[in-house]
Image (cartoon, rainbow, N blue to C red):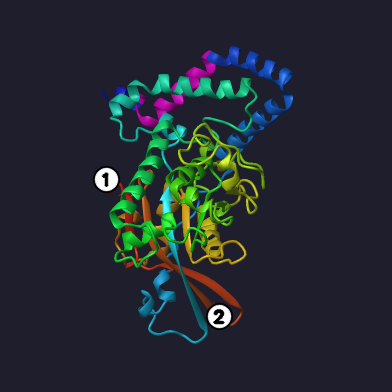
Amino acid sequence: MSFFSNILSYPAFIFFQITWLIHSLRRPLLLVSALCILTNPHAAIRKLKLFQVSFLYLALCKDKKWKVPSTDPASFFPKELGGTAPSNSSSHEYREKTLILIRHGESTWNDTFNAGDRSKLLFVAFFVPNLLYAILMEVYYFVSGKDSDSWFFDSPLSAKGVGQGEGLRRFLKKERMRLGVGARSNATTGEEKAVRLLLAAGEESNPTSQVVSSNLRRAISTAAIGLADRFAATSAKSDDDGILLIPSLQEISRNPDALTILPPEGKSRPTWCDDDIDGLSPGAFAELIDSRHHGGNKSLDSNGLIRLRQFCADVFDPSKIRKDVVIAAGHSLFYRSVFQVYLPRGTKHISKKKKLVNGGTVMVTLREASINDGSGRRKEYMIDPNSLVVVYGGFGKHTKG
């Protein structure tokens, strides 16, 4: 029984199945590859480069080679700002912004390799057919010359993931009706404030919030779908509302699904679900995306902590984000790391251990301390532990909405 259990252990099982499939399909794959290179060399070469980059990052990426700093972020902030420092030093300067964090819906990679809410028995039973389907889809993209699409690399939303983005949209629409958010008014709870900000309710001509996203397609699509009613309303009254790509939000992982397929400053192309978003006109998706700050993939020598700090710096950088409310579409490991690093060490919260669910949305206050240490100013960041509001979804099995 122990031998059988070892064979079916998750990593060994996946490795065995992938090896078997590649071995079984090696000849037709080689034939198809040769035909693709001959008929559409530009697309084929770009596709082969994606595979090369994937293996390079799998082998050399240092994304997870970091530890949560031992220094408590609360030590840089006075008690009146949620910290533990004794008093407000005259040499320190403080700023704060409101962050609303949205996790993307399920991706095609998740659908293939993660059980999700399926039973483990069902997942194992259908793993091989699902993997074969995924490989055939990748072959189809290769054969058809769709060099900007992939099942594995920068994986898009799955059908379930689209449903999770639509779930956020339905929740916001229901809350709008419940709260009577037809015009701007004073919110009475944190959740109501978040709903009004997410919808830009009553401020469609000049939103006080900026929507940003990681440079990965599943996050961009989730923002477009979940906030479609906002964009439908603001597009008629403002030219200044869209989805700004912030590369520092790129997921903390070495897997191919965490690598962006979008070229530096390139025009974001719609995935299978982006041109049919109800309420948005055809072609509106591409016009929403602002890629001026997108410089390509994270570097091989980068890691999660470097990008966490860069993201906080980006939030307070007026040359990138001018507004005081930032709505960010991103990823589970990135957001869990945000809470682990920037919530005070003494704060016990589920967000430090459990992932935000697909489509889940939370609101926090992020504070910046600009500290004069004699050699110049350095920046430190902290999430106010009293500011965390679960708007939709939640962490692990603790969900709402």
Amino acid carrying label 1: it is Lys
Q: Position of residue 316 (x, y in %)?
A: 54, 67
Secondary structure mainly formed by the magenta segment: helix
Nearer the observer, 103 or 225 = 225
Quick one: quadrant of the N terminus?
top left
Amino acid carrying label 2: it is Asp
Q: Does 22 appear in magenta?
A: yes
Residue at screen point 31% across, 52% down: 177
In the picture of the structure, the residue carrying the numbered disc 2 is 373
Q: Position of residue 378 (x, y in %)?
A: 56, 73
Residue at disc 1, secondary structure: loop
Callout 2 touching callout 1 (CB < 8 Å): no
Q: Position of residue 361 (x, y in %)?
A: 37, 52
The residue stretch that appears in magenta: 7-24
Q: Does 30 appear in magenta?
A: no
Tell me if residue 194 comes above or below residue 126 in the rendering. Answer: below
Tell me if residue 174 comes above or below residue 319 in the rendering. Answer: above
Tell me if residue 162 comes above or below residue 32 in the rendering. Answer: below
Residue at disc 2, secondary structure: loop
Residue at screen point 49% across, 67% down: 324
Nearer the observer, 286 or 291 = 286
In the picture of the structure, the residue carrying the numbered disc 1 is 397
Gap between marks 2 and 1 measured at Cα: 43 Å
Left/right placement of residue 75 relative to residue 151 reads left
Residue at screen point 53% across, 78% down: 371
